[in-house]
Image (spheres, helix red, strand yellow):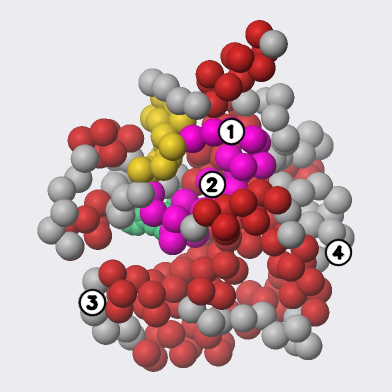
Amino acid sequence: MNKLFNHQKKASKITLWGVSVSPFVRKVKVALAEKGLAYEQQSILPTLLLNATNCSVPEKFAKTSPLGKIPAINDGEVNVSDSAVICAYLERAYPTQNKLYPECNEKYAKVLWFENFADNVFAEIAYKKIFMQLFIIPHVLQGVEDKEMVETAKNKELPRLFDFLESSLQGKWIIGDDFSVADIALVTQFISLKQVDVLVDETQWPKLHAYIERVLTRSSFSQVLIEK
Ligand SMILES: N[C@@H](CCC(=O)N[C@@H](CS)C(=O)NCC(=O)O)C(=O)O
């Protein structure tokens, strides 16, 4: 009873900063759901977009996210920003909940590699060159997308990354038998692609297509996608 009380008390003090449309915010929401941690969300745009839309930047957010990016969290007095750092922090702060990183050193390194690939290499194309152009620029900033950038990303750059992932998939999850933060980081990017109608062709990338569907059946993903 005491243990349960302590857990609930600890979990309820997490504040997540960021709008759910961000794949990086979604990544943290799924990680929190996997860990069964309660939180309250402050749906805020990054500082760059707050400024561009003449909105003020809350002091607490500025303090929590020094670069003004989303996501960021407050866990009591602890301020953490960047999705990869937040997930690593949550694993360490809440070690008894579902593990997001494997014990084995080699697998751990692979997970970090794929998480970095998802957040930086894949997102550079999927998020910056496609989602930003097709969603954020027209719908949030009322601007006009760079059509040439989108076409090159969709037809040349993205298929190469799909090929790489197709050849990397040897088991149930991206690094094999262990579901991890790498799966969360990757599939949250695919959700953004789907939101702008960029899909993975099942005939060309069958393993990747099945993998994404498999990850999406996890209750953490359904929970977050239902909330939206
Ligand atoms: N590496 C960061 C990337 C976060 C990121 O780029 N978030 C976007 C919103 S989806 C943002 O805040 N952009 C504003 C900016 O780059 O200043 C993470 O994983 O949290």
**What is the three-letter code of the residue carrying label 4?**
Gln
Q: Which residues are magenta?
A: 18-39
Q: Is residue 13 above or below residue 60?
A: above
Q: Is mark 4 within 8 Å of ligand 1?
A: no
Front position in the image: 48 or 42: 42
Q: Quadrant of the N terminus?
A: top right
Question: What label sits on residue 170 in the rendered view?
Answer: 4
Membership of 21 in magenta stretch: yes
Circles 1 and 3: CB distance less than 8 Å?
A: no
Q: Earlier in the sequence, mark 2 or mark 1?
A: 2
Q: Quadrant of ligand 1?
A: bottom left
**What is the three-letter code of the residue carrying label 1?**
Leu
Which mark is nearer the camera, 4 or 3?
A: 3
Q: Secondary structure at mark 1?
A: loop
x and y percent of residue 148 in the render?
39, 91
Question: What label sits on residue 166 in the rendered view?
Answer: none
Q: Secondary structure at mark 3?
A: loop
Q: How far apart are labels 4 and 3 at the CA level?
A: 42 Å
Circles 2 and 3: CB distance less than 8 Å?
A: no
Q: Is residue 132 left or right of residue 59?
A: right
**What is the three-letter code of the residue carrying label 3?**
Gln
Residue at position x 72%, y 36% from top? Answer: 99
Q: How far apart are labels 2 and 3 at the CA level?
A: 27 Å
User: For mark 1, does the 10 Å Cα neighbourhood hold few (<14), some (14 to 19), or many (20 or more) residues?
Assistant: some
Question: What label sits on residue 29 in the rendered view?
Answer: 2
Q: How far apart are labels 4 and 2 at the CA level?
A: 27 Å
